[in-house]
Amino acid sequence: MKNPYLPFAMRIDKIVIETEDYNIKTFRLSFLNKEDEESFNYLPGQFAQLSILGVGEAPFGIASSPTQIGGLEFTVNKAGVVTTALHNLEEGGIIWVRGPLGNCFPLEELEGKNIVIIGGGFAFTTLRSLTNYILNEKHRGQFGKVIVIYGVRRPGLFLYKNELKEWERRPDCELYLTVDKADEVWQGKVGVVPNIIKEVNPSPENSYAVVCGPPVMIKFTLPVLRALGFLPERIILSLEMRMKCGIGICGRCNIGNRYVCKDGPIFTLAQLSELPDELLIWR
Amino acid sequence: MKEMKIAKNDLVSFLDTLITEYEVFAPVKKDSSVVFQEIYSGSEALLDYSNSQKPPKEMFFPQKERLFSYDLSPKKAGIEEPLLAEKQRIIFGIRPCDARSFVLLDRVFSGGVYKDIYYIDKRKKTLVIALGCNRPKSTCFCTSLGGGPFSQEGSDLLLIDIGQEYVVQVITDKGEELIKKHKEFMEADEQSLFSMRKVVDTAEASIKFRVDVWKVKEKLDGMFDDPFWDLVSEKCLGCSACTYLCPTCHCFDVVDEVIGQRGERIRIWDSCAFPNFTLQTSGFNPRPTIKERVRQRIMHKFKYFVDNYGVAACVGCGRCIRECPVNLDIRAVLNSILER
């Protein structure tokens, strides 16, 4: 019987400071043990528990895509005890990992469909995984149009800037970046994500919307998508709740009778409509 | 196997023999309350008591439990799994309501995709000998939850006190094996069985409170947004005594503890009654007031658990009623739900 509470060690190969405020870093980790690598089969949308011995453990969406060979990436916003300790680590340091945990985006269901990816702030991590997965040459043909709408408060807060540039250059990906507030050099869109969705006006025809962001963004995005004609079955959300065990036992991340860690974090709006609106975003 | 019996005079020597082979846990009087702890002589076991203050769930799910330990000195960095217990254990004298709670906890700790090996290992290595409840307390309501003062669920053997002797109901193969090894047991005669039925009927009839938990669940299906939760939570202090003392509550926190270079990752009981339980690092709390937290406790026990496992997460032991500092009686809550 495998002990689900035991983490394995990974080494930090690279740390990228993502944002101008130095508050968000991406950690590229490599497996120390071949067996751990072989048993870590994940898909976009899943998360893992990262920990530092002596400090504690916290859940993070996996920011890399399984199409990237070797290692994993996690993007961490410095906010609490564990994230601060993670930020204090250097390349070569050790992070302990449990996972992959949770469900993934419904990739089979998304096949052959147009996909509108909508993200806000630093919650863009698993959406980046999904976008890279879909845009990968092995998978690109299986999906229709790809539209990415991504908003942050100000230009210096975008994650994965180099990748965004690559996506922008690709003819098979429509990228719309927006900021709440522009600076002198910003030439792109200005406005909150729900308004930009209205402007882009994606067709619901044969399409799915995948949404991840802060509660307030989701709250105002859902009515826009509904008005555009997206059905609740075709609006996919990734949720966050405080978690500890990550495996549906410790009892804290439930929304109604579902656990976000084990039954989620990915739900369709149709599924959520059956559940009590504990986060006050989908009713 | 047929019902057996054992003379009261033989029980202590039976326990003494068990102690040579097993770690035996039994109810013992400590200060002013009754607790379950390891006994080293059969005479230590308290046979005439109503129930322990703390539920015996800690036999399998200790209030604090090490998940693994580690050394922080640079040369040794690595984690060590805790050793699992070698010895088989017996819990003697627990009440049928508490024995039933193990069956409910099993669903959470071993019924899903992920197996909690710490819980499962202890459960496998433990034999449960329950003691029927001749005199249920005024706060007991096990019969509403699918149990009863002599319910067999969760026990390997059930002893029923009929005066000079105990009738022994043999529930599992594990229990039968144990009985066969000990010569103190003999087949129960008609006279003993007759006395047993009388004891059972009297005890069952003494539990007056009845509530239909299925009807409660149906009501709760549509009550998440009901103003009822404002009323029912008004006097709750959020002290969490009810959840800590509940034999079916299983929520826990996971934390690291370090002394010097040695550290442990442990889990400790936690409670949905605490504000920090769902507080996110961003400051957002989906259950910001006592209203949402009381709702979560009731919903989890009488709706969500029923949705997921087909049974309520309550055994009617009445501990939460007896120990609540503001007399928030869960039976009254269930009744008012039915009146909505």
Image (spheres, coloured by chain):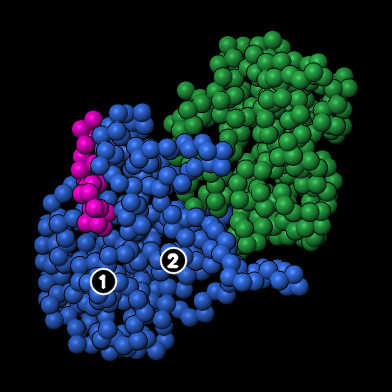
Chain colours: A green, B blue
At a point 75% along the width and 15% down the height, the residue shown is A189
Q: Does B230 sit left or right of B190 as displayed?
A: right
Image coords of residue B254 (percent x, y): 53, 57
For label 1, the residue is: B34
| Residue B339 forms part of the magenta stretch | yes
Q: Which residue is mark 2?
A: B62
Question: Helix, strand, or loop for circle 1?
Answer: strand
Magenta-colored span: B316-340
Disc 2 residue type (three-letter): Pro
Q: Is residue A226 above or below residue B84?
A: above
Q: Please rate how many residues cluster around mark 1, counting C-alpha atoms within 10 Å: few if below 14, some from 14 to 19, many from 20.
A: some
Quarter of the image that includes the N terminus of chain B? bottom left
Answer few, some or many: residues within 10 Å of disc 2's Cα (few below 14, many 20 plus, some between 14 and 19).
some
Q: Main secondary structure of the magenta part?
A: helix
Q: State left or right for residue B267 relative to residue B11.
A: right
Protein chain holding label 1: B
What residue do we see at 18% from left, 75% from top? Answer: B48
In the foreground, A148 or A53: A53
